[in-house]
């Protein structure tokens, strides 16, 4: 029997080449498909605890930034007045007021009357009402209470340019006395006449002075 050796070798060689080609084809990576869409980046989902930042809008054109306002300072408390001002409007009637005692050297033709709204106790302000009643015509009538240690006064002197003998001129004072105050006040009255000037001092007691009860609506002049 005759064996065909060249055919067997050819077949073995062919089988080896086919096996090598198959192994080479399996080792190559698969080619990427053409026109493939790009990969989508992962989306970041915000957490509930971190809200997205608010959008900042640019200021409109032409708008000017408002200047910073200074911090308002607390107003300083108003200092209370040592002596309260007397309140005008209602005056006691002339009949209810006491007559101030003139000094022996008084030369002015004026009667002075007085009364207190309340007893002038130490440390408590009381309103003193004064009324000047000229007995003759004159000018520049002036009534003032002389300042003295131990008594605080609030108001000012009465001053009239023209005086009529039938008129009544009034003045109010707030009086606050201390424990060591004098027992009376001195009221100075001056007035001009055609023949010259005259003056006189009048005494107003601070212990048990008349307290006004009956009043009228005569306004302060």
Image: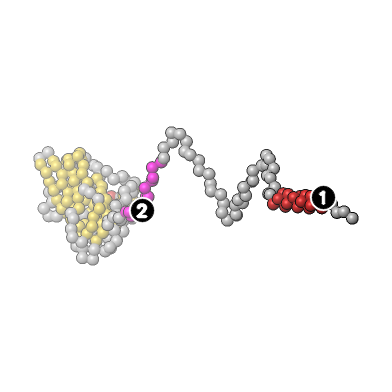
Task: Point out the image quarter for the C terminus.
Answer: top left
C-beta proximity under 8 Å, tags 1 and 2: no
Query: Is residue 34 visible in this depiction of the protein?
Result: yes
Please tell me whether residue 63 is drawn above or below residue 21 in the rendered image.
above
On-image quarter of the N terminus: bottom right
**Which residue is label 2 attached to?**
74
Q: Residue at x 20, y 61 (%)?
A: 150
Boundaries of the magenta span: 66-78
Q: Secondary structure at mark 1?
A: helix
For mark 2, does the 10 Å Cα neighbourhood hold few (<14), some (14 to 19), or many (20 or more) residues?
few
Residue 75 in magenta stretch: yes
The residue positioned farthest toward the bottom in the image shown: 179
Front residue (pair 42, 93):
42
Q: Residues within 10 Å of mark 1 (few under 14, many from 20)?
A: few
- Measured in 3D between alpha carbons, the distance from the residue under mark 1 to the one under mark 2, in whole angstroms, is 119 Å
Q: Which residue is under mark 1? A: 7
Identify which residue is drawn at 56% across, 49% down.
52
Considering the whole magenta stretch, tell me its main secondary structure.
Answer: loop
**6 left or right, relative to 146:** right
Return the x and y of residue 83 as percentages of the image width and height: 27, 56
């Amino acid at each position: 029997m005759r064996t065909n050796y060249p055919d067997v070798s050819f077949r073995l060689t062919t089988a080896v080449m086919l096996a090598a080609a198959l192994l080479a084809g399996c080792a190559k990576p698969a080619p990427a498909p053409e026109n493939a869409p790009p990969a989508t980046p992962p989306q970041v989902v915000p957490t509930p605890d971190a809200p997205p930042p608010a959008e900042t809008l640019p200021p409109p054109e032409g708008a000017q930034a408002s200047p910073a306002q200074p911090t308002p300072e607390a107003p300083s408390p108003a200092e209370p007045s040592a002596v309260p001002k007397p309140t005008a409007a209602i005056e006691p009637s002339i009949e209810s007021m006491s007559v101030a005692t003139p000094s022996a050297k008084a030369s002015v033709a004026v009667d002075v009357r007085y009364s207190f709204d309340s007893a002038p106790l130490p440390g408590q302000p009381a309103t003193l009402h004064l009324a000047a009643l000229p007995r003759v015509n004159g000018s520049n009538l002036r009534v003032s209470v002389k300042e003295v240690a131990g008594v605080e006064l609030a108001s000012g002197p009465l001053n009239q340019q023209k005086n009529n003998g039938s008129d009544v001129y009034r003045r109010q004072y707030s009086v606050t006395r201390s424990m060591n105050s004098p027992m009376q006040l001195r009221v100075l009255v001056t007035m001009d006449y055609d023949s010259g000037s005259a003056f006189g001092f009048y005494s107003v007691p601070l212990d048990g002075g008349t307290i006004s009860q009956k009043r009228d609506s005569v306004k302060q002049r």
